[in-house]
Amino acid sequence: MDELTLIRQAIEGNPYAFEQLLMEYSDRLYRTAYLYVGNREDALDVVQETAYKAFSSISQLRNEEFFLTWMTKILINCAYDVLRKRKKPIPSVTDPGAILSERNEEKLDLAAAIGKLPVRYQTSIILFYYYDMSLQEMAKIMETPENTIKTYLSRGKKQLRTLLGGGYRDGKRQIL
């Protein structure tokens, strides 16, 4: 079954279809949660809470094409809730090896530097460079105008340049 069919079935109340979608996106959701909360246990809590909230409100999803964007928005809000409840600051990435496939120094330095950015810059960098989201999708998730997202990306990259002292290329997109 294709993704849009699963999403439509989940919206209609099919729990199996929703479970299939969660299985498809679980790794991506976990990695995103880990980037925010900084440890395995909290990341799993965030993913679980996200799944619950998404399942409870999937009938409110208006556009099937934005399912992942919608889930990511819920996940980010859940991550902030977990951090607030536990009175933890937004952490720097303490174990980047858990989210990065290659454990080379450049990627470790980059992940640690991203963790030091202000929340709005951190979120925009993660969504744009790690998840290849468009500015439009990011604007919906962050509930911010697209031009503001561009500003966040620009300022975030500038701060990363300062923190890292140069450029960095990760996959398809040049970060600095």
Image (cartoon, rainbow, N blue to C red):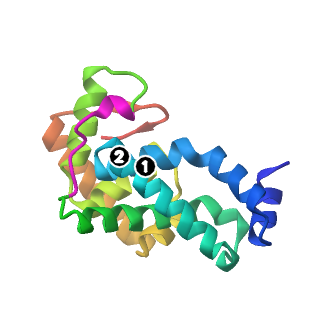
Q: Are marks 2 and 1 in contact (CB under 8 Å)?
A: yes
| Residue 21 point in image, percent of width and height | 68, 52
| Residue 1 point in image, percent of width and height | 85, 48
Identify which residue is drawn at 66% across, 75% down: 61
Is residue 97 found inside the magenta-colored segment of the image? yes
Identify which residue is drawn at 74% across, 61% down: 15
Task: Determine which residue is flagged by label 1.
Answer: 44
Tell me the SS state at disc 1. helix
Is residue 165 found inside the magenta-colored segment of the image? no
Identify which residue is drawn at 76% across, 52% down: 3
Q: Which residues are magenta?
A: 90-99
State which quarter of the image contains the C terminus. top left
Q: Residues within 10 Å of mark 2 (few under 14, many from 20)?
A: few
| Residue 101 point in image, percent of width and height | 43, 26
Q: How many marks?
A: 2
Where residue 168 sits, quadrant-wise, is top left
| Residue 127 point in image, percent of width and height | 44, 53
Task: Determine which residue is flagged by label 2.
Answer: 41
Rounded to the nearest whole Å, what is the CA distance between mark 2 and mark 1? 5 Å
Q: Is residue 56 left or right of residue 78?
A: right
Query: Is the stretch drawn in magenta largely helix, strand or loop?
Result: loop
Q: Is residue 44 left or right of residue 2?
A: left
Camera-nearest residue between 76 and 132? 76
Which residue type does callout 2 highlight? Glu
Which residue type does callout 1 highlight? Leu
